[in-house]
Amino acid sequence: MWGITLARNSEITLARQLYQSLQEQMLQGRLQSGDKLPSTRELAKELTVSRNTVYEAYEMLAAEGYIVSRQGSPARVADNLALETIQLSSPKRSADTVPDSVHYLADFRTGLPDLRQFPRYRWLQQVHQASENLPPGQWSYTGPEGLTVLREQIAAWLLRSKGMTVDPQDLFITAGATHALHILAGLLATQKKPEILVEDPCHLGMLRVLQQNNFQIRPVPVDEQGLNTAFLPKEAQACAVYVTPSHQFPLGSILPAGRRTALITYAREQGLYLIEDDYDSEFRYTGSPITPLYSLDPQRVIYVGTFSKILFPALRIGYVILPRPLQAAWRRLRLYTDVQNPPFEQAALADFLSTRKLERHIQSMRRLYGQRRQILLQTLTETFGSDWQVWGDAAGLHVALAFPGSCFDRNFISHCQKHCIRITPVDEHSIIKGRHLEKLLLGYGHLEPQEIRQGIALLAQCLERK
């Protein structure tokens, strides 16, 4: 009579199943305002369940206002419950779109470390030990700055690896570089200058973060030496410049000293900040890591670092070094967003740093990635001869290549996807389109030598068919 079917073997209790069935009928209008419900005894007999089951279902309906009942009278359906049914439309997929589940035969994504090489067992031991040793107070709210011991260890590591002198009090833990930029965008929005100067091309994800925070983006062109300071606007209404000086993304150049000092001078004259994103400078294959821009003026440079590339992306630990005038506002913004990072991974990373395990891992991976870069360049030469050139410094987990006369646009991406090749043209990361159509990005850090060779062979075949 009531159109109710109960699944006896379901993990959902019979009472909740009954509640859901009656609720659905009320929302769909099959049970209407004022309709009388049977007594608990009658419905229990009809459904062959206990009276307590029906009573519990009615209690849930009454608590949420679906039914009203008075002493001595039957329960009735409450007023104004019916909802119009809305059909959810599936997103349209273009004909040339490859599903996310596609198996790529060649995957040249950028920014991926080789997770097969990470010492997972050692790391899990570190997390377990660090969690056991964590004082009870650290299991509570510990504040937006991050664990003190981790901040101290990061400062010590930056001094050893890059010659940076950093007060741990100026260093704040984040959930990665993207998270840092989200908070910085909110913080800089209070400067009453709605514009940010951005390298062009730049990291597309970072650009979207700034756009989502309603900043006007003014692109500054990049050449073989990084951001071209000659194109900085003389009278900008900007609060910051976003720059990757140690390994420009995506073209890979190092910002030379002359442009660095010009950028610092510009920031001082304009009263703005420089956001330095140092995303992977640890992996440099022809010398030591580049000294960060931060060292030239800690009061004008906001330094953003991350452990996603040098350890593993799922760790979600990064850091930002802030000029002191911004620190109080940072604490407020972080406190009322997500409060803090989980303490356990922070404590484990602090131990990883203090015992120099991080440095040993970086040294090992630097050798491995350097070998893979050489294999990639050698394979490109064997396959394409001299019809290409490499851009940027010998560093990072990807390489930017120019193929003069080529046009790598959206049609090229679709063409590659149809042949199960994942690759990104530089133009995809350009704000002003069309300036870098002859350039491709090839990520190689996550690829074994045979995967690199196979991928280049497939790319060559794909280019021939184009």
Image (cartoon, grey):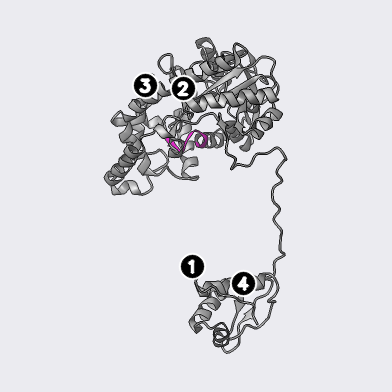
Marks 1 and 3 in Cβ contact (< 8 Å): no
Mark 3, other Cα within 10 Å: few <14 / some 14–19 / many ≥20: some
Does label 4 or label 3 sit earlier along the sequence? 4
Give, as a three-letter code, the residue at label 1. Glu
The answer to whether residue 201 is seen in the rendering is no
Give, as a three-letter code, the residue at label 2. Arg
Find the distance from the CA under tag 1 to the CA under tag 3: 55 Å
Q: The magenta stretch spans which residues? A: 173-179
* Residue that carries the numbered disc 2 in the rendered image: 372
* Residue that carries the numbered disc 3 in the rendered image: 161
Find the distance from the CA under tag 2 to the CA under tag 3: 23 Å
Find the distance from the CA under tag 2 to the CA under tag 1: 51 Å
Find the distance from the CA under tag 4 to the CA under tag 3: 63 Å
* Residue that carries the numbered disc 1 in the rendered image: 11
Q: Looking at this view, is 403 or 284 the one in front?
A: 403
Circle 1: element type: loop
Q: Position of residue 207 (x, y in %)?
A: 60, 31
Q: Position of residue 198 (x, y in %)?
A: 60, 25
Find the distance from the CA under tag 1 to the CA under tag 4: 19 Å
Q: Position of residue 15 (x, y in %)?
A: 52, 75
Within the magenta stretch, is there residue 439?
A: no
Residue plotted at (43% across, 43% down)? 340
Give, as a three-letter code, the residue at label 4. Gln
